[in-house]
Amino acid sequence: MTYFPLMLDLRNRPVLLIAGGPEAGAKLHALLEAQAQVTVLAPEDHWNLAGLAREGRIRWIPRSYQEGDLEGFYLVVSHPKDKSIHPRVKAEAERRRVFLVAVDDPENASAIFPAVLRRGELVVALSTSGAAPALTVRLKERLLQVLGPEYGELVAYLRSLRPRIAGVPDYAERKQLWYRLVDLALEELDLDPEAGLARAKEKVEEVLAEV
């Protein structure tokens, strides 16, 4: 199966989590970090659902999935104890044209969660299209050693340059300038991950001073 990679902005969007499975707590945490408006369907109070509901961070419905529960949601994440409900959930999701992440059940899913590496605003998503999730986790662990915190700092610094570079009127020149600056920065980080960022900023500023 071929998936189309996409980053979703879930801020203030209604998302349904059908919970109960062993990793549902991690999915809930990820959705809250994304600032989604989360409704949780779960018959039991795991993961401090009652407390989160009292704090207004989630809406908790203390029961299992029923037909019609998907109405009005932007995304559905399903990780129940009993995956036998997934064909019914999938059928409703198809009718309502809602993307469904059916955890550990790619046959009934229209979307999957990748393994995610975050360094500030730098986000790297890894997937084997549901074939070997354990491999994506191990590859993420390797990338964590390669892409240190300095890469998140680099992204923040490059973001701060956008207004200055936007002043270059010609598109082709702006594009060429961006790649020149990024290549300079990456070269310094490759030479010395710990001290390279400071040197990278110095070299970038020297180039910008000539623009």
Image (cartoon, rainbow, N blue to C red):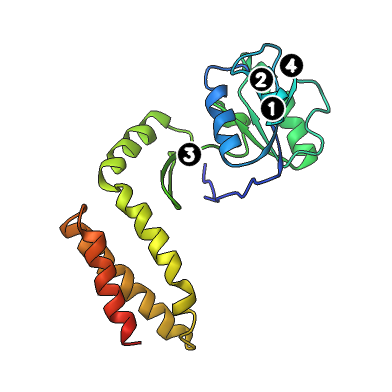
Q: Quadrant of residue 62?
A: top right
Of the residues tagged 2 and 4, which is closer to the observer?
A: 2
Residue type at mark 2 is Gly
- Determine the residue positioned at 38% across, 36% down: 136
Q: Residues within 10 Å of mark 1 (few under 14, many from 20)?
A: few
Residue that sits furthest to the front in the current view: 55
Say whether residue 66 is left or right of residue 152: right
Is 170 located above or below residue 143 in the figure? below
Using the image as rendered, state which of residue 151 and residue 1 is in the foreground.
151
Q: Which mark is residue 51?
A: 2
Is 19 located above or below residue 211 in the figure? above
Residue under numbered circle 4: 64
Q: Which mark is residue 114?
A: 3
**Residue 32 percent location from the top left of the image:** 60, 35
- Determine the residue positioned at 56% across, 38% down: 33
Q: CA distance from mark 1 to mark 3?
A: 29 Å
| Label 4 element class | loop
Q: Which mark is residue 55?
A: 1
Of the residues tagged 2 and 3, which is closer to the observer?
A: 2
